[in-house]
Structure formats: C-alpha cells, structure tokens
Image: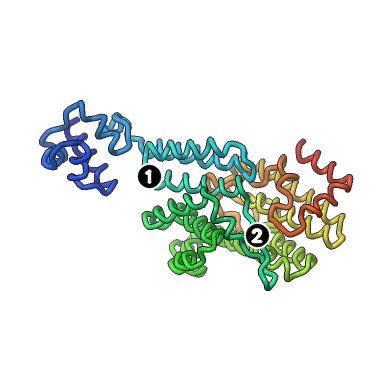
Amino acid sequence: MQIRLGEKIRELRKRNGRKQEDLARALGVTSQAVSRWEANGGYPDMEMIPAIANYFGITIDELFGYESDRASKVNRYFNEIIEMNHRNNGVDTCMDECVAYARACLAEFPDDKKLLYALAAVLFNAGYVRHAEHHLTDADGYDVYDTERHRGYQEWQEAIKIYERLLPLLEAGSLRDRTVRELLQLYLNIGEKDKAEMVVQTLPDMSSCREVMKISSCDGKARAAACAEALLKAVSTAASLMISTVLINQETISKAEAAAIIRNAIGLYELVMPDGNFGIYHDSLVCMNLFLSEHLWCVGDHDGAFEALDKALEHAKKNAIAHASMGEHYTAPAVKLAKIEDGAFSEAGNAASLSEDWPWWSVNGSEEVKAEMQKDPRWDEWVRRTKA
C-alpha cells in the first residue's frame, strides 16, 4: 500500500501540474514530507488521507488504487451529461438539471478535460434552448447574427471561457474538433470575428484533414474503408455548405433558386447511397426535407411541399430504426466499408417533434408560411402520422 500510495500521489500531482510545494502548502506539511512520500520513504498520517483525496478531486478508494477506474467513472459521467444534453434538442426538457449535473461532475473531477468540454457543450446548448439564435439582415441584404443580443447570453459567455481554457490542453482528435467547432460558432454569434479567424488559421486545409490523410496512412481493405469514410464526410460537409448558402443568401436569391440548392444537397446523399441506407445521415435528410417543404410551398408547389414532409417523416422513422440497430456499416457500393461509430447517431430526426421543429433552419417569414400550410388538411394528417 505504501508504494502504491506514493506513486499515486506523484502521478496525481503531475497530472494536475502541481509542485510538491503546492501540495505541501495545501496540507500544512513540509515539502520534504511530500518528497518522502513520493520516494516511498514513508506515508501520510491516515487523518490526512481525506484531505489529499479532496485536493486531487478523487475518492479515497481511488487514492489507494482500489478504484482504478477513474477514467471509466469520468466516461460514465461524460456520456450521461451528453445524453441528457441531447434530450434538450431545441426544447427545454431538463436544461437546468443538465447544467447542474455537469457542474457537479466537474466539481468531483475539476481538471478533467472531457468534463470541462461536457459543461461547455451543455452551456452552448443552453444558450440556444433558453434564448434562441437571432439574425438580422445587413445593408447588402445578407443574413448576419444579432451579436449585440447574443452577447447578453451568460451561458454562451461562460461556455467561451471554458472552451478557451480547454483548447490549448487538447490533442488532435474528436474532442478538440468539437471544441473548435463550437467555439467558432460562439465567436461568430457574439461578433468576435478576429478571435474566430485566429483559431481558423491554426487549422489544416481540406486536403490535409484527418479523413483525407487517413487514406494515405494505410492500404488494402483499411484504405478502402478510409476512402469510404472520407467520401461520406465530404458529402455531409458539401451538403451542409449548400444549406448554409441558402441561409446566408436568403435575401439575395429567390425561393425557387434556394429550393433547387436544397434538392441538390439532398441529391448528394442519394448519389452516393442510392440504396436508401443513409445510416447516421437520415437525420440530416430529415432536416433538409423540412427545409425544402417551406421553400416549395413558397413557390406554389404545394404538392411538392407535402411530399417533402412525407420524406422527412420517412427518414425520421428510418433514423430511429438505424439508431436502435446500430448497424456496423453501409450497404451502397461506394461506402459499404465505412463503419458507423458508437455514439454517431443523432436524435435530431425525432418523428414526434417534426411539426414543432419545422422548418428546422430559421428563415424569414416561416411563421406565416407555417400558418398557411396548417390550413391545408394534409398538415393535420401529416402531424397525426408523426405522432403515431
């Protein structure tokens, strides 16, 4: 026990970036005493053990090595926070509870990077759920963020501070990618364009992104799988950019032109996966078809608008099935080797909330359009089927 305890104290101290003097000062002992513990020349009085455990934010069992699954406990907390956060998908279902739980978990492990990210992600979402994202139209007719209003969101201000603290600590990987993506969005929301540009300049260009470079790091079947995964990411990114084009230019292009762009974005997925097995991308197709229905209604294609709503519902149901089955791969020839990672499924395409989520992305005049569509008897029938 003596050897394990000394090693554990040294490991925890270095993990937290603390000096022996820091620990000694906090415990009211000499630096020599801490050095002696770590060198296995003795061990602390038992009365001091709770204070040591508390200093490092761990349990006494973890300090003695009886509970070696600190990482598994953090992972459990992290997954619980993310799952709870997903429940607040555009609607405040349990946002206060989620924020409180994320804070409590971080208090237990105050220096853990995953839990720092989890709290930031919850606050990121809380700003949207509690206050919404607001837009204005600039002098040239382009969509811009209502940055003055957004700066008043305390949730976003706190999230930015956490992301900024976290970003230098993260190595390349999915957690860093998510941190960068969400921090950039918040910078944009509150008008910190210079800070956003500084972060952007640290990132590789598309030809050097992880998915593309992975193709060059392997061969055989692994390379074919990497190529399939990069293709899916490229399709998803291109479709997202096309939707962004519609949103950014909604005052400078016609509804008919916008509808064509949205159709083509949907078509990208259909070109690559013509068999209809869209895996994790069914949720994206839900959103895009909702968006398409609004534009088709505006150009007078009312039948097409309701066909798009039916498509959205179809994809929502397939998304639920795919999520439940957690299939390991796609079936279309070009992407059949691409794997679906655990946790990759989104619940954005929830059938029961489609009528509330419509048209998914904010567009000028959508409330008036919705009021018109609701007068069509097909709307109530569609809503009935979303709840079935």
In the rendered image, which residue does mark 2 sit on?
135
* Residue type at the position of mark 2: His
Image depth: mark 1 or mark 2 in front: 2
Q: Report the front residue among 318 and 147.
A: 147
Specify the quadrant of the image occupied by residue 76.
top left
Residue 258 location (% of width, % of height): 75, 65
Separation (CA) of disc 1 from disc 2: 35 Å
Task: Give the label on residue 112, or none.
Answer: 1
Residue at 88% x, 47% y is: 375
Q: Report the front residue among 270 and 377.
A: 377
Q: Report the front residue among 351 and 152.
A: 152
Residue 253 location (% of width, % of height): 74, 70
User: Which color scheme is applied?
Assistant: rainbow
Within 10 Å of the Cα at label 1, are there few (<14), some (14-19), or many (20+) other Cα atoms?
A: some
Residue at 15% x, 37% y is: 29
N-terminal label among 1 and 2: 1
Within 10 Å of the Cα at label 2, are there few (<14), some (14-19), or many (20+) other Cα atoms?
A: some
SS type, badge 2: strand
Quadrant where the N terminus is found in the figure: top left
Q: Is residue 287 above or below residue 84?
A: below
Q: Is residue 219 above or below residue 48?
A: below
* Residue 214 visible to an observer of this rendering: yes
Residue at 69% x, 68% y is: 249
Q: Report the front residue among 174 and 364.
A: 364
Specify the quadrant of the image occupied by residue 38.
top left
SS type, badge 1: loop
* Residue 226 visible to an observer of this rendering: no
Residue at 59% x, 59% y is: 232
Residue 155 location (% of width, % of height): 52, 48
Image side of residue 206 versus residue 263, left or right: left
